[in-house]
Image (cartoon, grey):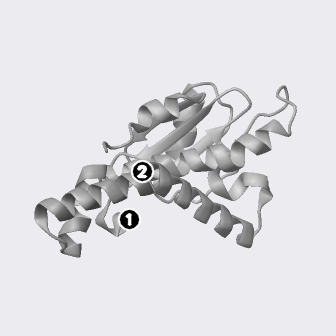
Amino acid sequence: TRPVPLDRLIGAYPLVHEEVPGLSHAVASTILGRWGVRRAGPPQPDATLAGFIYANARSGYIFVRRDDALPRRRFTAAHELGHFRLHLTPALAQRDPDTVELIQVDEDVAEADEVELTAMERQANRFAAEILMPEGVCHVLHEQCSRKYGTAARFAVHHLANELLVSREAIA
């Protein structure tokens, strides 16, 4: 019933997880360029991002905005890991490892249309929620909280969110 240690979970894959101040496409491209990645995809509007993922046949990078609160950073990292496992890994497996330079960011995955992108975002959100707030753990924590403090929903949401290091909105 402890929070999931995301660095260990992400580290089980050939991924680097970094918290980056002022994350944007340009910032991510600059960091990747220092690591020898030639480009981080087509030019994008330079809006602030909560998360960014880059993956090729050999490695990948998950960046999250350091300026966000801890629960948001954890959810974003788990969300990007979801994209890696659910969308990027299968796409990479279908390509020749010697020619795969880049598959990255949600909009570029499999050149998906808007309906597919929405579905992939929901899948990545669900993946993140299931990693950070496993149903069985939530039930155990809720039962413990109810026995100790009563059944007030508002208090239970606050307590569970604090225990799992997620937002109250997510746990609700």
Q: Secondary structure at mark 2?
A: helix
130 left or right of 101?
Answer: left
User: Which numbered disc covers residue 79?
Assistant: none
Residue at (80% x, 34% y) in the render: 100
| 20 to 119, vertically: above or below | above
| 87 to 158, vertically: above or below | above
77 left or right of 21?
Answer: right
Provide residue 112's location: percent of width, then percent of height: 77, 62
Provide residue 63's location: percent of width, then percent of height: 49, 42
Outermost residue on the left side: it is 149
- Res 131 seen here: yes
Provide residue 98's location: percent of width, then percent of height: 84, 25
| 103 to 120, vertically: above or below | above
Mark 1 — residue?
Answer: 170
Type of the residue with mark 2? Leu
- Res 23 seen here: no
| 155 to 105, vertically: above or below | below
User: Would you identify the image quadrant in which residue 34 lies?
Assistant: top right
Type of the residue with mark 1? Ala
Q: Foreground residue, 154 or 123?
A: 154
Q: Which quadrant of the figure contains the N terminus?
A: top left
90 left or right of 80?
Answer: right
Pointer 1 with pointer 2, Cβ within 8 A: yes
Question: Residues under labels 1 and 2: Cα distance?
Answer: 10 Å
Q: Foreground residue, 41 or 151?
A: 151
Mark 2 — residue?
Answer: 132
